[in-house]
Amino acid sequence: MAEALPKIDRAFLSVLVRGAEKTFDNAEKLYFEAELLAKAGSTARALCLHQISLEECSKIENMGAWATSLLSGLEVDQNKILAAFRRHSSKNKSNAYMLEGSQTENDAKVRGDWDTAREEFKKLQMEFHKASNEAKNASLYVDWKNGEFVSPSEQITPEMLTQVIERNQTFLGYAHNSLKMLKRLDKSPEDLQDLLIEFIEAVEKMPAEKPDDLMAALQRFLDTGLKRLKARARAAPFRHVAAGLPNQPLPFAADDTGRRDHTSEAPRVGLESRRTRDA
């Protein structure tokens, strides 16, 4: 007899989805408000709002991991997660999963040296958080540098703002896809629950096996899941759970180190426990 699937807390899953909707709405408003400031010539303050918008985007990704934990029956320390939502370092390090890796990290992954790849990624996380936080502070406060006081307008350049705008546009796209997936899970979480649990169990066993087996397990999850959603969509054409899946990138995409693969359409589901171990 097959083991019963964990009971889904539908009410709290809906709470998470509503929270993700509000968070995305806030991130989007911050983006447009930053654009208004930039047009008014307030380059430094515009960068600050874009950075806050980016931090909001990271919360949506983590809400996705929280939701998949609910579906799979994994225990979640709610206080720990909420505390991470308030820490700038946690949000910046989470966003680092969306960045392109360094050449050293990529070379390490090619040769299957996952320990080196993870160490290089940790360096990238720290560097990204430091740069992001320093730029945000510089956009707000007068600071002391090289023997003199410097204002935000003297520290934040148009080139810096352009870089953050481009990153925010990309990350808002990721966050929007993540929100769409959360909405699909909220409408019918049972559709993929068994596949999700199977995938997570496979990932949990991988430290004792080959790390590069992750992508094979992920591909099996995707192939089976998409076939199931398409079949159910054909059987019930007015259900929205499969809407847009064939032609749109899915959220939560990751590579073998738990990082987003920018060429993949794989959902980054169930990797929160792996990220915790590797951190």
Image (cartoon, rainbow, N blue to C red):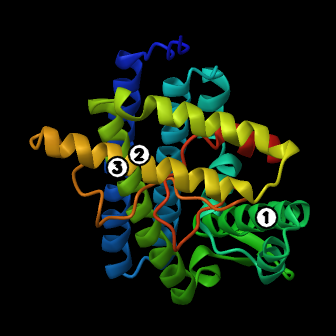
**What's the mark number on residue 225?**
2
**What's the mark number on residue 165?**
none
197 is higher (above) or lower (below) than 45 = above
Residue 121 visible in the current orientation: yes
**Image point (51%, 47%), residue name:** 221
Q: CA distance from mark 3 to mark 1?
A: 34 Å
Q: Nearer the viewer, residue 53 or 105?
A: 105
73 is higher (above) or lower (below) than 267 = above
Q: Amino acid at mark 3?
A: Lys
**What's the mark number on residue 121?**
1
163 is higher (above) or lower (below) than 255 = below
Name the outermost residue toward the left.
Answer: 238
Q: Amino acid at mark 2?
A: Gly
Which residue in the structure is indicated by mark 3? 227
Q: Could you tell whether 248 is left or right of 238 in the image?
A: right
Residue 60, position in %: x, y?
A: 46, 45
Q: Amino acid at mark 1?
A: Phe
| Circle 3/circle 1 CB separation < 8 Å | no
Residue 148, position in %: x, y?
A: 80, 80
3 vs 1, front mark: 3
Q: Earlier in the sequence, mark 3 or mark 1?
A: 1
Q: Nearer the viewer, residue 228 or 12?
A: 228
| Circle 2/circle 3 CB separation < 8 Å | yes
1 vs 2, front mark: 2
Q: Earlier in the sequence, mark 1 or mark 2?
A: 1
Residue 179 visible in the current orientation: no
**Image point (82%, 54%), residue name:** 210
Q: CA distance from mark 1 to mark 2?
A: 30 Å
